[in-house]
Image: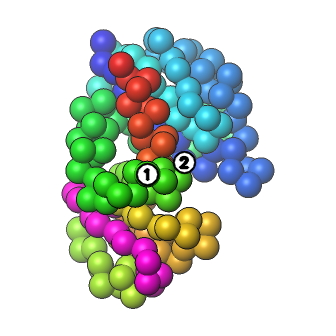
Amino acid sequence: MNTYIALLRGINVGGSGRLPMKELVEHLESQGCRSVRTYIQSGNAVFEHAAAAPVLTRQIRAALGAALGFEPALLLMTPKQLTRAASRNPFPEGEQDPAKLHLYFLAARPKQPDLDRLQGIAKANERFALEEDVLYLHAPDGIGRSKLAANVERVLGVSGTGRNWRTVQKLLDLTQ
């Protein structure tokens, strides 16, 4: 069995993409996922399954699409991948206020990332770093009004989903 961390995008945000976590557990279990655990209402789950990630991603998205009427974006990663992303955090001082440190897990490594453009829209106190397929953002004022946070995918040309440091740490705990 493989352990996976599932990050669903756009779940239970702003009244759209409604999916209670109890239902998410049921949907995942119906696809053969075992030992399913969820964290908060924004589409985070840890589970075990024998299938390879690409096959399982398609399977879960299709099942959710059939049941819910929409297919949420889904990124599956292993505990090793999440541990690596957390260990590469270039802003350790941001860990003291975990709601202000975000990791954007990208569906792929950006081919031609325009980091100068991102820097141009960042607030003076925002810092970011791109490491392969993870963009780290330390936003001391929060990401609610951050133009950088709002434009990550568009500027990088790849889809992704963000999680704050607290969520990353909790998901790592759930994999133990």
Which residue has dot 2 on it? Answer: 9
Q: Nearer the viewer, residue 149 or 166?
A: 166
Name which quarter of the figure residue 78 lies in: top left
Q: Residues within 10 Å of mark 1 (few under 14, many from 20)?
A: few
Q: Does 31 appear above or below 75?
A: above
User: What residue is shown at x 65% (from left), y 28% (from top)?
Assistant: 21
Identity of the residue drawn at 37% across and 72% down: 127
In which quarter of the view is residue 131 placed? Answer: bottom left
- Label 2 crowd (10 A; few <14 / some 14-19 / many >=20): many
Percent across and percent down for residue 105 are 38, 51
Hey, which quadrant is residue 76 in on the image?
top left
Q: Nearer the viewer, residue 146 or 49?
A: 146
Query: Is residue 133 highlighted in magenta?
Result: yes
In the rendered image, is residue 46 in sight?
yes
The magenta span reads: 121-135
The residue that appears at 38% across and 31% down in the rendered structure is 172
Residue position marked by numbered label 1 in the rendering: 96
Q: Where is residue 138 in the image (x, y as percent from the top left)?
A: 41, 64
